[in-house]
Image: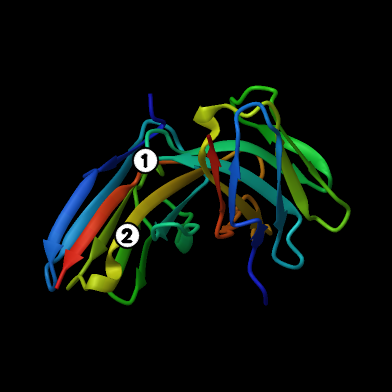
């Protein structure tokens, strides 16, 4: 049983389309992070959200942390081929937020 | 500031052998975590070291072990390799910025193939 679920598992869209991917859990996290990973490389940190209801924007990417700090979403506006990759969410637990649990990821393909 | 480095990047071993992987964290980071990533299981937590002490451990057999040195560099060792140990092994370092908030930065990984 995955502690963190991500949906959809796969997504293939055309350049210029908008999309939203979701990260859900029944557990509460002290913070939640989103990463993008390209084949053969390590995940690259995109954002950390900490406060319930928090919204952060990174250019065309908008991240939201659920009010109860159990779920999060990532919205991409006008997707570009450079957005292609595996999007991972990770929830932090533990007294110092040092214990991370990763979701299985959403594999996004943006076609030109 | 240099990122997390991992060596070697690629490794091919045969069943029964052992392997040691190395990770150098970002300068100033004292926490190092190790993960195994496979297509079927995704990213799975192996262990975390902080100030040379293993602080957390995932659900892996005792063949997987690690250590951290006084300069925060870390190594992980896998003994008696099995075919199922083929994976991308990722190291991540972190530095607490705010109370209870940690941000992990990953290295490029070591691709281990067991034949």
Q: Residue A85 has which mark?
A: 2
The front one of B93 and A60 is B93
Quadrant into which the C terminus of chain A falls = bottom left
Element type at mark 1: loop
Q: In x, y percent, where is residue A78?
A: 17, 73
Give me the residue at 71% from left, 60% from top. Answer: B25
Circle 2 SS class: strand
The residue at 48%/54% (across/down) is A50
**Residue bearing mark 1:** A104
Q: Is B19 above or below relative to B30?
A: above
Which label was assigned to residue B44?
Answer: none
- Tell me where residue B92 appears, x and y as whole percent: 61, 53
Left or right of B70? Residue A22 is left
Whether residue B2 appears in this view of the structure is yes
Q: CA gap, disc 2 to disc 1? A: 13 Å
A9 relative position to A34: left or right: left
Marks 2, 1: nearer the viewer: 2
Query: In terms of image quadrants, where is residue A62?
Result: bottom left
Instruction: For label 2, count other residues whose C-alpha is less than 10 Å away and answer few (under 14), some (14-19) or many (20+).
Output: some
**Quadrant assignment for the N terminus of chain A:** top left
In the figure, is residue B15 to the left or right of B40?
Answer: right
**x 64%, y 22%: residue:** B61
State which chain disc 1 sits on.
A
Q: Residue at x 68, y 31 (%)?
A: B17
């Amino acid at each position: 049983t995955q502690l963190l679920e991500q949906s959809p598992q796969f997504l293939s869209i055309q350049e210029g389309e908008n999309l939203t991917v979701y990260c859900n859990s029944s557990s509460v996290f002290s913070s939640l992070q989103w990463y993008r990973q390209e084949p053969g490389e390590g995940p690259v940190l995109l954002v950390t959200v900490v406060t319930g209801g928090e919204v952060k924007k990174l250019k065309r990417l908008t991240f939201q942390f659920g009010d109860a700090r159990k779920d999060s979403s990532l919205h991409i506006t006008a997707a570009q081929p450079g957005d292609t990759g595996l999007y991972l969410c990770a929830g932090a637990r533990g007294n110092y937020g040092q214990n991370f649990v990763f979701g299985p990821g959403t594999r996004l393909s943006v076609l030109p | 500031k240099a990122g997390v480095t991992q060596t070697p990047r690629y490794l091919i071993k045969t069943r029964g052998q052992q392997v040691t992987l190395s990770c150098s964290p970002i300068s100033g980071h004292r926490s190092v975590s190790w993960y195994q990533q496979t297509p079927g299981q995704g990213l799975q937590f192996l262990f975390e070291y902080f100030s040379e002490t293993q602080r957390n451990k995932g659900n892996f057999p005792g063949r997987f072990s690690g250590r951290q040195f006084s300069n925060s560099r870390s190594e992980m060792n896998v003994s008696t390799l099995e075919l199922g140990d083929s994976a991308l092994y990722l190291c991540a370092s972190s530095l607490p910025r705010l109370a209870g908030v940690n941000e992990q930065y990953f290295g490029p990984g070591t691709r281990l193939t067991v034949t």
